Amino acid sequence: MTIALPSRVESRRVVFDLSQPVMVAFAAVLCVLVVLPVSWLVIYSVTDSRGTLTLDNFRQLVTDPAFVDPLVTTLTIAVASSVICCAVAAPMGWLVARSDMPFRTAIRSLVMASFVTPPFLGAIAWELLAAPNSGLLNKAYRALTDAEMDAYLFNIYSLPGLIFVISCYTFPYVFVLIANALDRIPGDLEDASAILGAGAWHTARRITVPLALPAVLAGALVAFLQAMTLFGSPAILALPAGFHTMTTKIWSLFQYPPKPELAAAAALPLLILTVLLLRAQSLVLGRRGYSVVGGKTGEPRLVRLKAMRWVALAFVLAALTLPVFLPYLALFNATFSKVASQAIWFDNFTFRNIYFVFFELSATQPALQNTFILGTLAATIGTVLSLVIAFLTARAVVRGHRVLGFLATAPIAIPGIVLGVGLFLAYTRPPFVLYGTLWILLIAYVTIELPAAYQQLQSALRAVNPELEEASRILGATRLQALRQITAPLLRTNVIATWCFIFVSVIRELSAAVILFTSETRPISVLIFDLKESGDLAAISVLGLTVLVITFVVVVLVNRIPGFGSARLRNT
C-alpha cells in the first residue's frame, strides 16, 4: 500500500492543472468589475459632450446653485442624521448590552427588523403616516382636536421630515457597532474599578465610555455616510417637497435630455468623500489607545436597573415604534383598506388590492421574475467569486493577492448611485453594450455586494487550518479540487449565509438599479419606486409587504442554520 500511493500521486500530477488559469481569470473578472466603471467615471468627468478634455463640469458644480444647494442640503442631512442616530443608538446599545433590561434578545431582533427594511419602503410608510393632508397621524390629530382641515401635526415632505426618516433606518448601523463594542468590554475592568471604590457612574465615565467611544465615533461616520449616499428616501420625500440632495440630483441628470458628463462630475466627489469617510472610520476603530490587552477575561457585568428596568424598556420600545411598528402598521393598513389613507375597519376591509397587484397589474410578474432571476444569479456568482477571491488572498495563492483584497473591498467605497453612473457609462458602448439587459443589473448587484461577502468568507477561511488543503495537495488534488472538496464543505454554513445575504440585498437595492433599468428589466424595487410616481399607495404597500415577507423568511431560514443564528446576531 505504501508503494502504490506514490505512483497514484505521480499519475495525478501529470494531469494538466487548470487551477492557476482559472484563478487568474477570477482575478481578472474582479478587476473588470471594479476598475472599468470607475475609469469611465473619471474619463467622463473631465470631458464635454464632444469628447474634449475640460474642467468645466467641476467648475459648474461649485458655481451653479443647482448643484451647490443639493450639496449643502446633503451635508446638512448627513450631519443631523449622524447626531440623531448616535443620540438614540448609544443609550439603546448600552441598555441592551450592559443592563438587565427585560427582553434584550427580542430588542436586538427588532433592531435587525428595522435594519433589513429598505429605506425607500420606510419612507413610503411614513408618507402614509405623516403626509400633511392624507397622513393617518395627521387625520387622527384633526379628528381628536377638531382642527382645521388644512392643519397638520407632522409634515413628512420637509427637510426635518427627511432627516427623521433617514435617521430611523440608519440608526441600526450605529446600534450594532456600539452594542458589539460594549459586548466585548471585559467585566474585569469594571469589577476592578468597583473594588477600588468607584461608583457606577464614575466607572462608566472612566472605563466603559472611553472603551466604547471609538465605536460611537465610527457609528457617527457610518451614519453620515449612509445619509449622504442614500437615494430612495430623498427621491420619495425631497422631490415632492421641491428640493434635491446630491443623489437625486445625479439621478435627475439622466432624465431627458441626459447629461452624463455632469453626472460623472457630480458622482466623483461623492466617491472621494466616501473613501475618506471609510478611511476615517478605519482609523477610529483601529486606535491603539482604546485597545483591551490581556488574556482570558470575564463576562460583561450587567448593571441592575431595579425599578428603572421597565422605564428603560418603554424608552427602547418607543424608539422602535418609529422605524418598525408604525411603518409596518401603515403598510398593513394600506394593503387591506379600500382607501390607503383611511384607517382599516370592517366596512372598508378588502383583498382587492392584493388581487389587483398580482393578477391585474401587468408589471408585477415581470418585476418579480426579474428580481428572482437577478437575486439567484447575483447570490450564486457573488458567493463563488467571493469564495475564490477570499481563498486567493487568505492563502496568498497568486502574486498581487493584496491588490485583489483591496479591489474586493473597494466597492464598499462606491455609493450605489455612483456605481450606477459608472456602469451606465461603461456598458453603453462597444465592445460591451449591456444596457437594456439584465446583465448590467447583475454586474451592479454583484459589485455592490462583493465587499461584505468577501470579508465574511475571508474571515471564515482564516479559521480553517491550511494543513487540510495541503494534505489534499500531497495526495494529488489541484488547488481547485482542494477548494471544492475540502475548504468549501468546511465553510458550508458561511457560504449559505453569504448566498442568502446577497439574495436579500438584491431585493432591496434601488440606488444603482434606478439608473440602469429599462421597462423590460425592471426589478421589484424600481417597480415600487415607479408606482410611487403614479400615487398608487395601495399597490406599493402590497409589494412592500411582499418584499418584507421574502426578506424575513430568508433571514429566519439563515438563522436556523445550526451554529449560525445566535453567533451572527452577536457579531453582525
Image: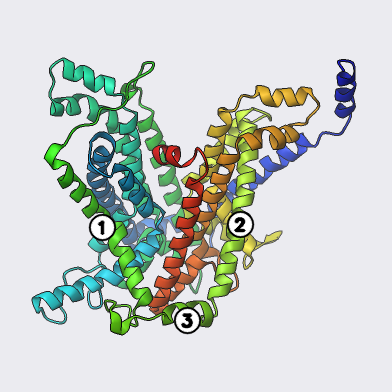
Q: Identify the image quadrant of residue 523.
A: bottom right
Lateral position of residue 229 relative to residue 148, left or right: right
Query: How many numbered marks, from 0 up?
Result: 3
Frontmost residue, 82 versus 332? 332
Frontmost residue, 453 versus 39? 453
Lateral position of residue 33 relative to residue 292, left or right: right
Amino acid residing under circle 1: Thr
Disc 3 + disc 2, Cβ < 8 Å: no
Q: Which residue has dot 3 on it? A: 356
Is residue 168 among the parts visible in the rendering? yes
- Which quarter of the rendering shows the C terminus? top left
* Mark sitting on residue 321: 1
Q: Identify the image quadrant of residue 291.
A: top left
Frontmost residue, 128 versus 63? 128
> Which residue is rendered at x = 15% and y = 46% of the image?
311
At which x and y percent is residue 314?
Answer: 19, 50
Amino acid residing under circle 3: Phe
Mark 1 falls on what kind of element? Answer: helix
Mark 3 falls on what kind of element? Answer: helix
Q: Give whichever of discs 3 and 1 has the lower sequence position.
A: 1
Q: Give whichever of discs 1 and 2 has the lower sequence position.
A: 1
> Which residue is rendered at x = 60% and y = 36% of the image?
491
In space, the residues marked 1 and 2 are separated at their CA atoms by: 33 Å
In space, the residues marked 3 and 2 are separated at their CA atoms by: 27 Å
Lateral position of residue 122 relative to residue 43, left or right: left
Q: Give whichever of discs 3 and 2 has the lower sequence position.
A: 3
Q: Which residue has dot 2 on it? A: 376
Vertically, is 400 above or below 358? above
At which x and y percent is residue 38?
Answer: 55, 50
